[in-house]
Image (spheres, helix red, strand yellow):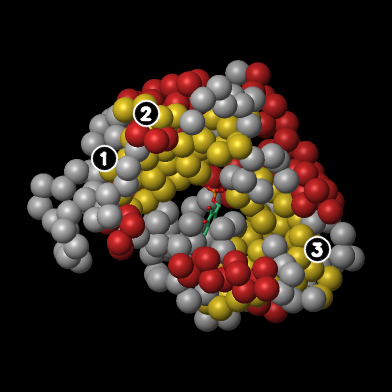
Amino acid sequence: MIILYGDQLLKREQVHVDIEDRAYQFGDGIYEVIRIYDGQPFHMQDHLDRLEKSAKKIRISLPYELDHLEALLKELIRQNDFTQGNLYLQVSRGTAPRNHAFPKNISPVIIAYTQPFERPIKEQTEGIRAKTVNDVRWLLCDIKSLNLLGAVLAKQEAYDHDCKEAILVRDGMVTEGSSTNIFIVKDGILQTHPANQLILHGITRKITLQLADQLQIPVKETAFDRSALFEAGEMFLTSTTMEICPIIQVDGQPVGNGKPGKITRRLQKAFVQSISSNSKR
Ligand code: PLP
């Protein structure tokens, strides 16, 4: 397997992460997961733009231009002969003797590699179960930070209850999933949390809102409370890896009639069409 390390494409055995890398010691860095379908990156530009925004927010200056990074990532895909799955990209603040404050003259460390991953067709067809969990994460959730412990613990709590996703609730309001954005349909209106500091501004969330607009599905980007989950007719989550996936049960209660809803199905269909037009480009 070939890995992007800095601006070099190396064999995995040649890449060594330093014990004093701040990503490792502090989670001091940012990341992206980009989907590859038929050898083509999906919405790569949106992911790179978000990476740049995250970098600015934590005061990391990327060591080279986004165009150069994009060219290196495409070369990585080509050299690995990679067709289906995820491209993981991480930027650490860099390596220095351990001390919380930013070290002087530190250079960011970029790592990217490909991971095979099949589209989760079963989950998308049948829907998944979810569990509500307190959102105890920090208050800058719009940064795609490497600090994922809050998300890890929430996801595990869901798994411990035989659920696939944790729906996070902060001060009584639903924010997002542990690694997804959450949508409900109530009275024919699609609702999701506004893109502020309490959620990650998901690329799939953005695509879904564009598709809803094209399909003339009314949308409200407003926060809703936990009880709205139990009054919703439909519910789904969105993410790069899960795409659009119905949620059919929350905390043991069926959502609507306990089956994926009609609006969810229309959006899923439109999403799959956008994947195939991306692959044909
Ligand atoms: N929300 C959180 C907390 C996430 O970690 C993710 C993805 O990792 C998402 C939402 C979905 O974002 P995207 O659609 O860009 O994958």
Task: From the image, tell me which residue sits under label 1.
Answer: 62
Task: From the image, tell me which residue sits under label 2.
Answer: 10
Dot 1 falls on a residue whose secondary structure is loop
Looking at the figure, which quarter contains the C terminus? top right
Residue 49 visible somewhere in the drawing: no
Dot 2 falls on a residue whose secondary structure is strand
Q: Earlier in the sequence, mark 1 or mark 3?
A: 1
What residue is drawn where x is 64% and y is 52%?
238
* Image depth: mark 2 or mark 1 in front: 2
What residue is drawn where x is 59% and y is 63%?
177
Checking the image for residue 98, the label placed there is: none
Left or right of residue 263: residue 10 = left
Whether label 1 lies within 8 Å of ligand 1 gets the answer: no
Mark 3–mark 2 Cα distance, whole angstroms, equals 44 Å
Q: Earlier in the sequence, mark 3 or mark 2?
A: 2
Left or right of residue 243: residue 173 = left
Is 105 drawn above or below residue 261 in the view shown?
Answer: above
Q: Position of residue 12 (x, y in %)?
A: 42, 35
Along the line of sight, which residue is nearer the eye, 85 or 54?
Answer: 85
What residue is drawn where x is 80% and y is 48%?
122
Residue 124 visible somewhere in the drawing: yes
Checking the image for residue 248, the label placed there is: 3
